[in-house]
Amino acid sequence: MTDVHSKATRSKNMRAIGTRDTAIEKRLAALLTQLGVEYRVQDASLPGRPDFVIESEHGVIFTHGCFWHRHDCYLFKVPATRTDFWLEKIGKNVVRDRRDIGLLHQQGWRVLVVWECALRGRLKLDDTALTERLEEWICSGGATAQIDTQGIHPLRVSPPGTA
């Protein structure tokens, strides 16, 4: 199947996709603020430039887009055009995510990944459920977890340099 857009239009559309202050980041920021959590955003000194850094809990939070980070949910669809290109690109993102989370874990940081599907879409968690999951992670002292449409779960991380 060929792309419905010209190469120039597709390029313009892809460049317009933001990397900070996205809708899902804004929603999560509002919930953290509502909880009274103090945080920094986009800390470039840490591996992976976490979206939120909660210094008091020595925790970091990533908001991952389900397409860009290949989440196994209804929001991820393998592209019909340039499939090999996209799968390679997304695969590199997944490898980088594992590496960065592993490095953060080695440095003693607690890591939470909040998936896009938990924040938007037809199966998203409501504010109460999402706030409860955030509080659960913050208060638990647990190292790594993820929040998706099913709630909060452990996140398995391979040490850097392993698959």
Image (tube, helix red, strand yellow):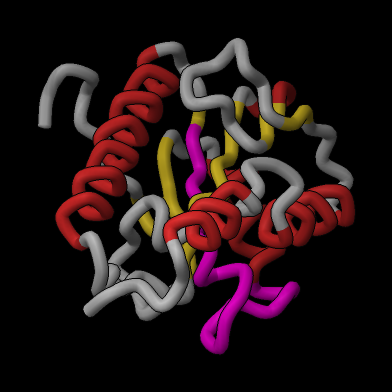
Where is residue 47? Give x, y as percent.
48, 19
- Magenta-colored stretch includes residue 118: yes
Note whether residue 106 is visible.
yes
- Give the residue displayed 68% in from the left and 35% down from the top: 52
Where is residue 4? Give x, y as percent.
41, 78
Toward the left, the furthest residue is 163
Note whether residue 114 is visible.
no
- Magenta-colored stretch includes residue 33: no
- Give the residue displayed 67% in from the left and 60% down from the top: 24
162 up-or-down from 126: above or below: above
Quadrant hosting residue 83: bottom left
Report the quarter where the C terminus lies: top left
Q: Which residues are magenta?
A: 111-129
Please state which of residues 119 and 94 is positioned toward the viewer in this rendering: 94
53 up-or-down from 125: above or below: above
Please state which of residues 142 and 60 is positioned toward the viewer in this rendering: 60
The answer to whether 113 appears left or right of 27 in the picture is left
Where is residue 59? Give x, y as percent.
59, 30
- Give the residue displayed 30% in from the left and 25% down from the top: 99
Please state which of residues 21 and 27 is positioned toward the viewer in this rendering: 21
The answer to whether 19 appears left or right of 5 in the picture is right
Report the quarter where the N terminus lies: bottom left
